[in-house]
Image (spheres, grey):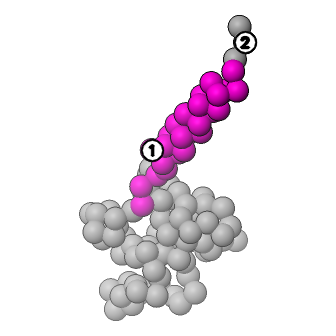
Amino acid sequence: MKTSRRTFLINSAGLVSSLALSRQVLAADHVDENSPLAKQLGYKHDATQVDQASQAKYKPGEHCANCQLYQGKPGDAWGPCPIFSGKDVAEKGWCSAYTPKA
């Protein structure tokens, strides 16, 4: 069976748009700072916003990207963290489960 160029282009466009939509669906949700677990751990998307009075463990310069638990790639704005299963944390975020990379 011979496929015309027009049919090929239409099918290709459909495939590309389907792949793009599936990537959006599969993308992990970001951790909600107001979720019970995030509040319990003092999670903030921006480590500079951590309340140092209530989070005595926090030290300036600590953030998710330099934590052992952060599973994002270097330079990613968001990445997975096993503490917040199925959710991404901000590279510049922080929570009390912070463990410095060795």
Image quadrant in which the N terminus is located: top right
Question: Where does the image place residue 3, in percent across and percent down from the top left?
Answer: 69, 17
**Magenta segment:** 4-30
The answer to whether marks 1 and 2 mark residues whose Cβ atoms lie closer than 8 Å is no
Looking at the picture, does residue 10 appear above or below residue 64?
above
Label 2 CA crowd tier, 10 Å (few <14, some 14–19, many 20+): few
Magenta stretch: residue 34 in it? no
Question: Where does the image place residue 78, in percent across and percent down from the top left?
Answer: 53, 64
Question: Where does the image place residue 84, in percent across and percent down from the top left?
Answer: 42, 57
| Amino acid type at image mark 1 | Val
Query: Which secondary structure dominates the residues rendered in magenta?
Result: helix
Query: What residue is at 36 percent from the left and 88 percent from the top?
Result: 51
| Amino acid type at image mark 2 | Lys
Query: What residue is at 55 percent from the left and 61 percent from the top?
Result: 79
Q: Report the residue that reaches farthest toward the right.
A: 2
Image quadrant in which the C terminus is located: bottom right
Please tell me which residue lies in front, 44 or 76: 76
Q: Is residue 74 left or right of residue 47?
A: right
From the image, tell me which residue sits under label 1: 25
User: What element does badge 2 sit on?
Assistant: loop
Please tell me which residue lies in front, 47 or 8: 8
Closer to the N terminus: mark 1 or mark 2?
A: 2
- Note whether residue 65 is visible: yes
Q: Is residue 48 left or right of residue 65?
A: left
Q: CA distance from mark 1 to mark 2?
A: 34 Å
From the image, tell me which residue sits under label 2: 2
Quarter of the image for residue 77 reads bottom right
